[in-house]
Image (cartoon, rainbow, N blue to C red):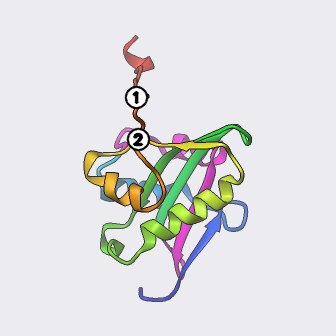
Amino acid sequence: MGTKIAYQRKEERPIAAAAVRRLYDGAGWWPDWSLGGIDRAIEASVAVGAWDGERLVGFARAISDGEHRAYVEDVVIDPECRGRGIGEGIVAALLQAIGEVHIVSLFCEPERVGFYGRNGFRASETAVMLHRDQEKV
């Protein structure tokens, strides 16, 4: 590693579910997600990979209606590559890929608020994030 990072949309360079699974595992995310489910999520999303040569070292995706709203779902960086500015680079690439959407939203862990604040996001004073786990209904 150590080469220049290339940020590419899934349409420019396919993103393999197995490579994303490795990044999720490194972050401790979604251990029950199958490769097929990850592949479908990539396909249904605006998705960007951060590549160090042939190795996927970052992944970000968003869901968007293409006009009014987009929701950033995942921003994950290989633990070995953190601290190199890849997170900021991939967020910028994802926002460019999303395009001219009125509002881009996300939710994050409290320790990530500063990172997203430096990247143009701000906490909502009026919204509360709610979840419904369909498997438990």
Residue farthest along the top direction in this orientation: 137
Q: Are marks 2 and 1 in contact (CB under 8 Å)?
A: yes
The answer to if 41 sits in the magenta stretch is yes
Question: Residue at the location (45% across, 18% down)?
Answer: 134
Give coordinates of residue 112: x percent, y percent.
Answer: 32, 53
Residue closer to the observer: 130 or 120: 120
Q: Which residues are magenta?
A: 30-57
User: What amino acid does circle 1 point to?
Assistant: Met
In the rendered structure, find residue 129 and report the number of the disc placed on it.
Answer: 1
- 10 Å neighbourhood of mark 1: few (<14), some, or many (≥20)? few
Give coordinates of residue 38: x percent, y percent.
Answer: 52, 45
The answer to if 17 sits in the magenta stretch is no
- 10 Å neighbourhood of mark 2: few (<14), some, or many (≥20)? some
Q: Tell me how far mark 2 sits from mark 1, CA to CA.
A: 8 Å
Give coordinates of residue 57: x percent, y percent.
Answer: 45, 70
Residue farthest along the left direction in this orientation: 111
Residue 45 appears left or right of 115:
right
